[in-house]
Amino acid sequence: MQIWSPDEVSSAVAALRAGRLVGMPTETVYGLAGNALEAQVVASIFAAKQRPTFDPLIVHAATAGAALGMAAGVPEEAGVLADRFWPGPLTLVLPRDPSLPELLSAGLDTVAFRVPQHPVARRLIEECGFPLAAPSANRFGGISPTRADHVVAELSDQPAVAGVIDAGPCAFGLESTVVGFPQPGRAVVYRLGGLTVEQLREVLDDLEVVRAFDAVDDPTLARRGEQSPGMLARHYAPRTGLILLDEGEMLPEHHRGKSTAHLGLEDLSESGCLVEAAANLFGRLRMIDEGGFDLIVARRVPDEGLGRAINDRLYRAAVEKS
Ligand code: TXA
Ligand code: MG
């Protein structure tokens, strides 16, 4: 697998035109990009990630007009959010136009769209001339890559992946916030991410948030737009067991004496800055995971701004494991 500099976007474009896959830097995390309009290419993304085909992909476009133009309709709230927050770390789930490959939607009647802000991602999509389907560039269930070498570690053994463009570490370090519109007048956050609930509420009064710890294993909920398929899978998880404690909570007796790595706000940002902590979270988890510890003892961070998304990822990493 090649490692290209941002000056070598044209090599990545050639690979994408030939139907291969490319590691794409975005402001959130690195994506594994392929031509969203070619069903076979979309299928190869699922295969390279070993992702189950019930979990749909995000289609990345260069402009809001291009993204909204691919949907079968644009709810009013979606238009407002697109205007205000695109390009940026926001994904909108919109009615599916039947001309798009079915596999993108994983059987739902909606498709997710995002207009990334990262200049390299934008150039890549523009020069390709087609939209790019891109999940995070990790094996299914693993930690999302926030640097090019993470992509190499996750996917270098996959022949469909031609290379990765190395544009340095991602600014946000958390995936995009995913918002859907299950009925007229309703906006639902399916995944907390780089755009905060507080920012969304500046423009939408009525905004529901489905939290990962409320997600229920019922496929009809995803079909009705009440939650997202991605909420169910054990996600964002390190291999090392992770226990999530509240501030001040003691480590349970049966875990004492183990070799533990600690992960709290002060480990992610010396000054306690949630933006910096978010950017460092996945890289730190990856590093700890290679340290041979028995257990990761994580502590919840303040539940505000990006802290909500950090707590969501820690919760999911801990689910079924502690
Ligand atoms: O920041 C990001 O969003 C990154 C970068 C590369 O853009 N991409 C990313 O993709 O995180 P992925 O595939 O790892 O996560 C997509 C999430 C999943 O939770 C999926 O279930 C949800 O979006 N999703 C996609 N299409 C959906 C749909 N039609 N309805 C509901 N949820 C959907
Ligand atoms: Mg992912």
Image (cartoon, grey):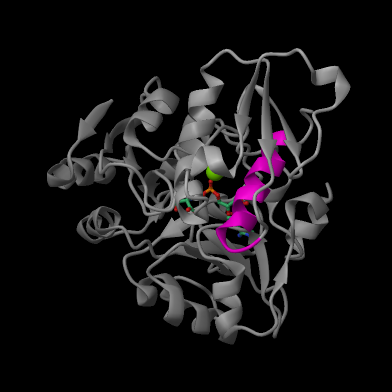
> Observer-nearest residue: 288 or 42?
288
Query: Can you say whether 41 is above or below 60 in the image?
Result: above
Task: Tell me where residue 275 appears, x and y as whole percent.
Answer: 47, 55
Is residue 237 among what the camera can see? yes
Asked if one can make out residue 138 in the rendered structure from this viewpoint, the answer is: no
The magenta stretch is 304-318
Whether residue 178 is situated above or below residue 155 in the rendered picture: below
Residue 123 within the magenta-colored segment of the rendering: no
Residue 50 falls left or right of residue 300: left
Question: In the picture provided, is 237 more to the left or to the right than 152?
Answer: right
Q: Look at 66% across and 66% down and name the residue there.
A: 189
x and y percentages locating residue 182 in the rendered image: 71, 73
Indicate left or right for 262 with 97 as reference: right
Residue at 74% in and 59% down: 227
Main SS of the magenta part reads: helix
Residue 195 position in % (x across, y down): 51, 65
- The image quadrant of residue 116 is bottom left
Instruction: Decide which of 226, 268 is in the foreground and name it.
Output: 268
**In the rendered image of this protein, does residue 148 appear above or below residue 290?**
below
